[in-house]
Each structure stands twice: as structure tokens, then as C-alpha cells.
Amino acid sequence: MGVSRAKDVEEEKVEKRVEKKEVKKPRVERAKEIVRLADTDVDATKPIIQSLRSIKGISHTMAKAICWACELDPRIRLNQLTPSQLKRLEKVMMEPTKFRIPSWILNRRKEIETGKDLHLTGAQLDIVTRFDVQRLVNLKTWRGVRHMFGLPTRGQRTRSHFRKGKTVGVLRKAAKLLMQKAEEKRREK
């Protein structure tokens, strides 16, 4: 009796293991939701044009040109592309002139140092822009001086809209009365 009881217990354990395996849900692979392009995390659930526009330095026109150069439909979602298509997409973003994208779309035409047409994205664009502003400040050009003082550089009015964070405005009557009372108290002393 003892041996048959042990066999029954083992059979129950095996049955439980089998049941557990059957209960487990099959693993379903989820489509990629985020793709890394040009050192930026891009939402892959959106169409290619919208996804590319979330990368700093790529406009709507540039995104359409990249899709054209890669021979992709701009309405396809980014997560539907194969890895080879994604690599080609990134290659076109980094070197657009090699893929017959016209120079008037690029954001850095006839660069000062090299004279070449470039298209910069992400952190590269931030760094180069910062150096350009610093060069203007060092040369003390009109735009450089305006940058140095934090003023608008393209002819905007300075009386109303450019003021950010600075306390300006009209004093209200209550504030005027408080100031007058404080001044009277100071005079009395």
C-alpha cells in the first residue's frame, strides 16, 4: 500500500505540472513601440513622416524627401519596416546629399568652415548653433550684441511680447497707495 500511495502522489504532481504548462499563455511578440533613429527615441506607432519630424532638425519637407530617397510610402508606420529599411532610413538622414536630396532642403548650406552642404540633427544641431551664436558674440556683430544682452535679433518689437520673466507692467492703485504709505512712514522717522 505504501508504494502505490507514493506512485499516486507522484502522478498527481506530474498532472499538476502538466496543467500549469497548459495554463501558461503563449508568448505573443508585441510590435515595437519605440525605435532609435539618429540618437533619438522615436514613436514607431505613427506614420514615418510624423515619426521623423519628432527628430530635432528634420522638417516636414525633409521627412518627405527622406521617404522619397528610401522609396518608402510615408503613410506606413515605422514599426512595420524591416531592420534593413531602418538602417537605410538612418543612412539617408545622415548623408542626404548622397541620395540626391536637393541642397535647398538641408539645414546647413555652404557651411562657413568647410563650404559643404550638410544636414545636422539632434545634439549636433544644438552644438553647431551654440558655436555660431558664440562666433557672432566674439565678432561683436549687431546680432551678436543682441544675443549677448538677450534681446530679439530679427527686428521684433521689444516693448511688449519679448519680455519673459521680467517684472514689468503698470502699478495698480492699491500698490501705489502702499508705496505712498511706506514712503510717508519713512519720512516720519
Image (cartoon, rainbow, N blue to C red):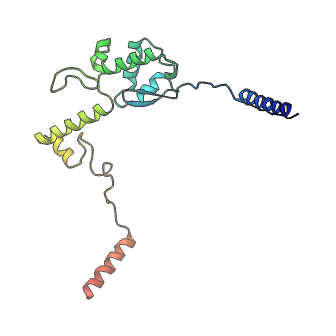
Q: Name the quadrant containing residue 9.
A: top right
Along the line of sight, the residue nearer the viewer: 19 or 74: 19
Residue 64 is situated, as x and y percent measured from the top left of the image, at 41, 19
Q: Is residue 66 left or right of residue 1?
A: left
Q: Name the quadrant containing residue 53.
A: top left
Measuring 28% from the left and 31% from the top, which residue is drawn there? 124
Q: Is residue 125 left or right of residue 90?
A: left
Measuring 31% from the left and 80% from the top, which residue is drawn there? 182
Q: Compared to 18, does 149 lie above or below?
A: below
Q: Residue furthest bottom?
A: 189
Measuring 20% from the left and 36% from the top, which residue is drawn there? 131
In the rendered image, the quadrant that contains the N terminus is top right
Measuring 43% from the left and 14% from the top, which residue is drawn there? 84
Q: Compared to 20, does 96 lie above or below?
A: above
Along the line of sight, the residue nearer the viewer: 75 or 172: 75
Q: Is residue 166 left or right of residue 2?
A: left
Q: Residue furthest front?
A: 2
Residue 93 is situated, as x and y percent measured from the top left of the image, at 35, 21
Along the line of sight, the residue nearer the viewer: 130 or 64: 130
In the rendered image, the quadrant that contains the C terminus is bottom left
Residue 19 is situated, as x and y percent measured from the top left of the image, at 76, 29
Number of numbered discs overlaid on the protein picture: 0
Q: Residue furthest right?
A: 1
Residue 59 is situated, as x and y percent measured from the top left of the image, at 37, 26
